[in-house]
């Protein structure tokens, strides 16, 4: 019989929180699409690509992250994923200037 350690609950909470933050970052710009078009001077398709790109990145990174999970374990893999999410959010922040749409797209 398995014993449920409190550490498992902490890992579950951390995973849920990291997933929520990643999803939140992916839809950040959807409610303000028209404002982004005017601010950056881009098309509606370019703004929509910010949200759609999240799905593409998920598909591309799924297998490498699954291999990382297998080799490093869940804790280290979650740390790597959270750090990559943090770096991506930071890159988006750096694209806050009027000519920074490419940085926002990269982040």
Image: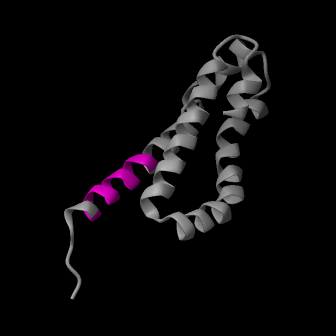
Image quarter hosting the N terminus: bottom left
State whether residue 27 is above or below residue 12: above
**Residue shown at the point (40%, 55%) measured from the top left:** 15
How many dots with numbers?
A: 0
Q: Which residue lies furthest to the bottom in this view?
A: 1
Q: In this view, does 21 lie to the left or right of 65?
A: left
**Residue shown at the point (73%, 16%) measured from the top left:** 40
State whether residue 98 is above or below residue 6: above
Dominant SS in magenta: helix
- Please check the rendered image and state whether residue 68 is part of the magenta-colored stretch, yes or no: no
Query: Does residue 27 appear in the picture of this structure?
Result: no
Q: In this view, does 101 lie to the left or right of 26?
A: right
State whether residue 75 is above or below residue 22: below
Q: Is residue 27 left or right of residue 74?
A: right
**Residue shown at the point (69%, 13%) measured from the top left:** 39
Image quarter hosting the C terminus: top right
Query: Does residue 39 appear in the picture of this structure?
Result: yes
Q: Where is residue 84 in the image (x, y as percent from the top left)?
A: 57, 42
**Residue shown at the point (71%, 52%) measured from the top left:** 56
Q: Position of residue 35 (x, y in %)?
A: 63, 17
Residue 51 quadrant: top right
Q: Where is residue 12 in the image (x, y as percent from the top left)?
A: 33, 59
Q: Residue furthest front?
A: 72
Q: Which colour scheme is used?
A: one colour
Which residues, given as a range, are shown in magenta? Answer: 8-18
Residue 90 quadrant: top right
């Amino acid at each position: 019989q398995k014993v449920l350690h409190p550490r498992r609950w902490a890992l579950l909470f951390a995973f849920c929180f990291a997933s929520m933050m990643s999803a939140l970052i992916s839809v950040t710009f959807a409610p303000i699409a028209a404002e982004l078009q005017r601010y950056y001077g881009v098309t509606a398709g370019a703004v929509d690509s910010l949200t759609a790109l999240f799905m593409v990145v998920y598909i591309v990174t799924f297998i490498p992250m699954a291999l990382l999970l297998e080799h490093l374990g869940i804790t280290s893999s979650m740390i790597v994923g959270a750090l990559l999410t943090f770096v991506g959010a930071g890159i988006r922040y750096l694209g806050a200037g009027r000519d920074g749409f490419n940085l926002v797209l990269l982040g």
